[in-house]
Image (spheres, rainbow, N blue to C red):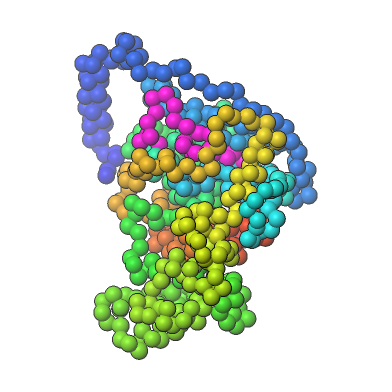
Amino acid sequence: MTMVTEHAPRRWTAALGLVFAALALAGLALGATPALAQAGRSDAVSVPAPVVTRHETTIRGQRIAYTATAGETLLRNDRDEPTASIYSFAYVKTGGERDRPVMFVFNGGPGSSSVWLHMGVVGPRRVQLDREVNPSNVPPFGVVDNPDSLLDVADLVFIDPVGTGFSRIVGVGKPEDFYGVDEDAESVAQFIELWLTRNNRWNAPKYLMGESYGSARAALLPRALMGGPTYGGVMRGITVNGVVLLGSSLNGAGTAGLSPSLGAALNLPAMAATAWAHQKIDRRGLTIEAFDAEVTRFATTDYLAALDKAAAGRLDDAERVAVAARLAAYTGLTPEAWLPGLTMSPKAFSQQLLAADGLTVGLYDGRYTLPSAHDGGEPVADDPAMGRYVPGFIAAFHQMLAEDLKVQEDRPYGAIVWRNLLFGWNWKRTGVPEGQSFAGDLATAMRRNGDLRVLVASGYFDMVTTPAAAHDALVKAGVPAERLTIRNYESGHMLYLGDTATAFSDDVRALVRDERR
C-alpha cells in the first residue's frame, strides 16, 4: 500500500471529514461532552499504590543496591476508559543514570506470566532446586541471590501480560481486546510507553527479552513501539537497541508454517541431541556442538531431499533403507523404527528412546525423565521436564513475593493461565503479508533500525522449539546476519537450567555492552 503520494493529503482530508460528519450526526462533535459520550466511562476502576522495597546483591563481584517496585499499571482506551491492569516487577539500580539501559522481560504461552525468566536467570533472586536436572518436585525449595542476574548492566522490568500473573481485564475491557497476536503486542507496547514516561527513561537504551511465545511478542513489539497509521493508529516513536529471543517460536499459528518434510527434518537434530545426552548413540568423541552441526547438515540436505522424494513417490527401497540406517545411528533407535515412513514425531521419540528402561524423556528438555507407566497424557504435568521444575519455580516466586517484595494479594498469581484462551487467541495479523513468520517482523524492524541487534538463544535438547527451526525461520526471513548472534546451549527449552545460566547471561551482557563476540 502506498501511504504517501501527492494525492494523499486530499484523501486524508476527505476521510477525516467523513469521520467528523459522523461524529456530529451522533451528537459527538469535537469539543462537546454530551451524556452519550460519557455513558461508557468507568472511572471507578483504580489500582493500589505500588509496593516499593530496597535491597542489595552482588553480581560478578560488584555490590549493587537496588529498588524493587511491584504494582499495577492501568491501561486506557482512546476514550480514557480503563480496560486492563498490567502487573509488573521493576528492579532499578540505586543512583543509576537516567540513560542506564533498561530491559523489558516476559515469557510466552500465550497465557504465561514472566515467572520463569524472573526466577530462572534474569532477576536478582532465583529459585534454588536440589539439582539442576531432574530435581525433586516437592518442597522445600530455596530462594537465593542470583549471581547471573543482569541487574549489573541494565535495570529490569518483568511484565505479566493481561490475563497472566496478577494482570487482568478491568472496566470496559473485553477478552478480544487483548487475546491475539497484534492485540497482545499493542497492550505490552502501551505498558512500556507508560513505564518510560512515569520513570523518565525515554532516553535510556532499551532491550526486549522474550521466551517461547514471548519470542514472537519480542519480534512484533518493535513495530508496535514505533506505531503508525495502519498499526495501532498512534505514533509512539520508540526504538529498541536489542532483542533477545529464547526458545524461539517464530512459525506459530497464522503463519505459513513448515511443510511436513521440512518440519520432520528440523525436528531431527533435537531428537539426536537427546540421544547424545543419554549416550544412546556412538558419540565418536564429538562434542554436542560438533554432533549437532553434523546432524543438522544431514537433516537439511540428504534427509530433507529423501522425504521430498518419498512424498512424491520417487524414493526407491535402497535409498529408504540407507536413510533409515543414518537415522538410527543418530537417534539410537532401530532402523525398523524409522521404516517405512522415515519420520517420527518428537512425542513418539520421547516415548521410545528409553522405553527399555521404562522411562519417557521430556519434550521441553530431553535430559529429564519420568516413568513411562501411568502417563496421564497432560502435556505439562506429565512432561518429565515441566512436571519436575514448575513446582519449585512457583513456590520460590511466592516466597520471594511475600518475604522480599512484601507483596500481599488476595487473588492467585496465574503462572500460566490457559483458560484465558478459551475465547480464542486471534492469530490474524494486520498489515503484513498473509502467512508471514514472526521472524519477518523482526527483519522489518532491523531494516527500519540499522542499530538493532538480536541474540537468539536455544537449547540443544529442546524438542518443542528447536534450534534448527529457529535458525531456518531467521534465514528465510532475511534477518541481517551481521547483527544477529545465534547461541545454542547444553540445555532445553528453559536453556538456563543445567549449569548454562552463566554462559547465557554473559552473552546477553555482551549484547547490552555492544561487544561483538
Decide: is 156 above or below 337.
Answer: above
Quadrant containing the C terminus is: bottom right
Residue 177 highlighted magenta (yes or no): yes
In this view, 480 is above or below 126: below
Q: Is residue 238 above or below residue 76?
A: below
Residue at horizontal 65%, vertical 36%?
A: 401
Residue 141 placed where, x, y %?
A: 69, 48
Magenta segment boundaries in residue numbering = 156-178
Residue 75 in magenta?
no
Tally of marks: 0
* Residue 139 seen in render: yes
Q: Residue at x 45, y 66 (%)?
A: 346
Q: Residue at horizontal 54%, vertical 42%?
A: 415
Would you say residue 153 is visible in this rendering?
no
Where the N terminus falls, by quadrant? top left
In this view, the residue in front, 348 or 71, is 348
Residue at 32 percent across and 38 percent down: it is: 230
Q: Position of residue 493 (x, y in %)?
A: 54, 58
Closest to the observer, 228 or 245: 245
Residue 30 placement, left or right of 265: left
Residue 118 as seen in the image, left or right of residue 330: right
Percent of width and height locating residue 506: 66, 55
Taking depth in this image into account, of 513 and 11 the one nearest to the observer is 513
Q: Quadrant of residue 81?
A: top left
Q: Residue furthest front?
A: 374
Q: Position of residue 372 (x, y in %)?
A: 52, 66
Quarter of the figure with residue 281: bottom right
Q: Is residue 352 left or right of residue 410?
A: left
